Amino acid sequence: DAKTTQPTSMDCAEGRAANLPCNHSTISGNEYVYWYRQIHSQGPQYIIHGLKNNETNEMASLIITEDRKSSTLILPHATLRDTAVYYCIAQGAQKLVFGQGTRLTINP
Amino acid sequence: DGGITQSPKYLFRKEGQNVTLSCEQNLNHDAMYWYRQDPGQGLRLIYYSQIVNDFQKGDIAEGYSVSREKKESFPLTVTSAQKNPTAFYLCASSRDRGYEQYFGPGTRLTVT
């Protein structure tokens, strides 16, 4: 599974869009980009995933660059409840590898 | 409601005792997983199972054992051989390997 690189922490104002970057320059053609988040002391929650095309669901949007070496998770209107650690994972048929993620803090 | 349950939420044991953590899912998922999380760290895979009566070691299987006798259940035993068992343990399931995983609420184990 490809290694991913994320900033350690980010801040965002409530109501604004939160844009979380992820680099996965060694991603292979059959690996999907997955995003999960973990709110303190809870189990991680699946957010979204994609292969090549941009994806959107009720929680977030995922923008993947054309060369697939990086992606951005967008929370369009961040709320205080979006404060969490966000994990970006490049996953094939093998195991998930959770790095340390990005600690996103939404400020009032 | 479909989901994954783990019990108990908090567990305390004395050093040298084996302890079994429960994980049950009613999502009809074939694959199930156990992870360990230490403070400030990401998740590390202990064991996973793709199908009933089959399971594979993950990255940190030493000192742990599992069974998968039923599709719905994947209990984890933390044995006395595990050197640092105090941690947050998370169970997950997915439709199959490579699909998104759904996590339980976790069990926080403290061994003294």
Image (cartoon, helix red, strand yellow):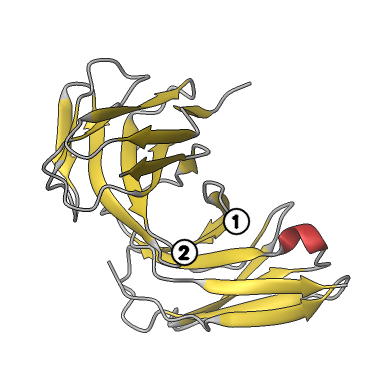
Q: For the point 49% across and 40% down, which residue is it?
A: B102
Q: Position of residue A63 (x, y in %)?
A: 61, 73
Asked if residue B14 lies left or right of residue B106, the reply is left
User: Identity of the amino acid at label 2?
Assistant: Leu
Q: For the point 23% across and 23% down, which residue is it?
A: B68
In the rendered structure, the residue with mark 1 lies on which chain? Answer: A
Same chain, labels 2 and 1:
yes
For disc 2, the marked residue is: A51
Mark 1 is surrounded, within 10 Å at the Cα level, by few (under 14), some (14 to 19) or many (20 or more) other residues, namely: few
| Residue B66 visible, this angle | yes
Tell me, yes or no, whether the two marked residues, 2 and 1, touch with CB atoms within 8 Å.
Answer: no
Asked if residue A75 lies left or right of residue B30, the reply is right
Q: Position of residue A42 (x, y in %)?
A: 56, 47
Q: Is residue A34 above or below residue B105?
A: below
In the rendered structure, the residue with mark 2 lies on which chain? Answer: A
Q: For residue B30, which quarter of the picture?
A: top left
Mark 2 is surrounded, within 10 Å at the Cα level, by few (under 14), some (14 to 19) or many (20 or more) other residues, namely: some
Q: Position of residue B12 (x, y in %)?
A: 38, 35
Q: For the point 54% across and 28% down, which residue is it?
A: B3
Cα separation between marks 2 and 1: 28 Å
For disc 1, the marked residue is: A40
| Residue B95 visible, this angle | no
Q: Is residue A7 above or below residue A57?
A: below
Sequence-first disc among 2 and 1: 1
The front one of B39 and B17 is: B17
Q: For the point 34% across and 50% down, which residue is it?
A: B36
Asked if residue B23 lies left or right of residue B76, the reply is right
User: Identity of the amino acid at label 1?
Assistant: His
**Quarter the C terminus of chain B occupies:** top left
Q: Position of residue A5 (x, y in %)?
A: 42, 81
For label 1, the SS is: loop
